[in-house]
Amino acid sequence: MTWYLLGAGNIGTLVASYLARAGQPVRRVGRGPAPLQRNLLWPDGRHQALTLAGDDGGLIQRLVITTKAQDTADALRPLLPRLANGALLLRLQNGLGSLDALPLPEGLQQVEGLTTSGAWRDGAQVQVVAENDTLLGLAQGDPEPPADIAALLPHWPGARWCTDIRRQQWLKLSVNAVINPITALNDCPNGALCDDPARQQQARALADEADALFHRLDPDWPGDTYGRALAVARATAANMSSMRADVRAGQRTEIAYINGWLLRQADQLGMSLPAHRLMVAALPA
Ligand code: KPL
């Protein structure tokens, strides 16, 4: 069964290389019939030449979504007539809710992924920086992966099936909702959150509001978003957050799918999250 790939960026290319290793054919979708050549290089010197076949206009029964959250609805909308009922979707992107506004067909199996693997691209060369943990799971918490995912996992270093993906996504989102907008607005590296009292105060307000919301959504929410955000900021001190990179590049940010997602949940519960609302208003969506 062919997989289609929406978003042949760095992570998309990495996933395509695992699919190729697993013997599952993969082609790009929505970018015309021309194939795409990529050469992946690993830090230990290994390399893999990858040819991504172009779009054939066929029925989509397997789809990997690795576009940025803010680009997803526009990219996927024209493809909806090709999406089969019961298709398998694998979504790997920052943020939540990127598919919410789309009239998706019935019975989709939507596998959600979280990864901290990293790669960067120079022309056709994709340099893999790190293959870290990748969690894949269904929102319903199914104990077993769909067959095609089970067949893929052994070929994907660091990947494992996860039965509480939603909790893991919320934990990551809560941290991103603190670090990303503060670093983007202040044009500072992640570590700058740890040593500046004004930024710490901002971080505290965002973290406390996120915890209040998640406690309403899940009484077992562990809290301490502030502590977790600071720990991640410290561990990635020299990094440029993805939102800061988008702002610097003059692009739309993921704000509507990180802090904006929190606001949409809060609105439904009649809660106000003023610190997050400020961030949503301040950053380009
Ligand atoms: O996920 C990230 C991002 O930049 O989007 C963090 C964890 C903040 C690392 O930069």
Image (spheres, rainbow, N blue to C red):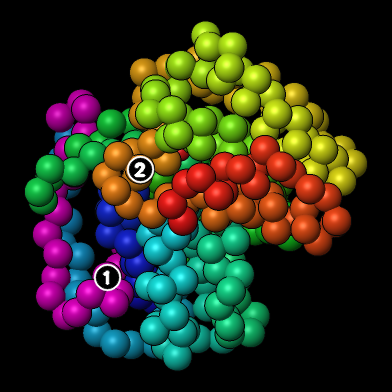
At 55% across and 49% down in the image, what residue appears?
Answer: 281
Q: How many marks?
A: 2
23 falls in the magenta region: yes
| Crowding near the residue tagged with mark 1, few <14, some 14–19, many ≥20 C-alpha atoms within 10 Å | many
Regarding mark 2 in the picture, which secondary structure is present there?
helix
* Residue 61 at x, y percent in the picture: 46, 79
User: Mark 2 = which residue?
Assistant: 247
Q: Specify whether residue 152 is in view.
A: no
> Which mark, residue 44?
none
Could you tell me residue 224's position as x and y percent? 75, 24
38 with respect to 179 (left or right): left
Q: Is residue 195 above or below residue 103?
A: above
The stretch in magenta equals 20-45
Mark closest to the chain's N terminus, 2 or 1: 1
In the figure, is residue 164 to the left or right of 237? right
Q: Nearer the viewer, residue 53 or 226?
A: 226
Residue at position x 47%, y 51% in the image: 254
Q: CA distance from mark 2 to mark 1?
A: 27 Å
Query: Residue under circle 1?
Result: 28
Q: Residue at x 46, y 56 (%)?
A: 285
In this view of the protein, can residue 233 be seen by the observer? yes
Number of the front mark, 2 or 1:
2
The quarter holding residue 5 reads bottom left
- In which quadrant of the rendered view does residue 167 lie? top right
Q: Nearer the viewer, residue 276 or 2?
A: 276
Q: Which corner quadrant of the image does residue 189 belong to?
A: top left
| Residue type marked 2 | Val
43 vs 150: above or below? above
Between 188 and 176, the residue placed more toward the observer is 188
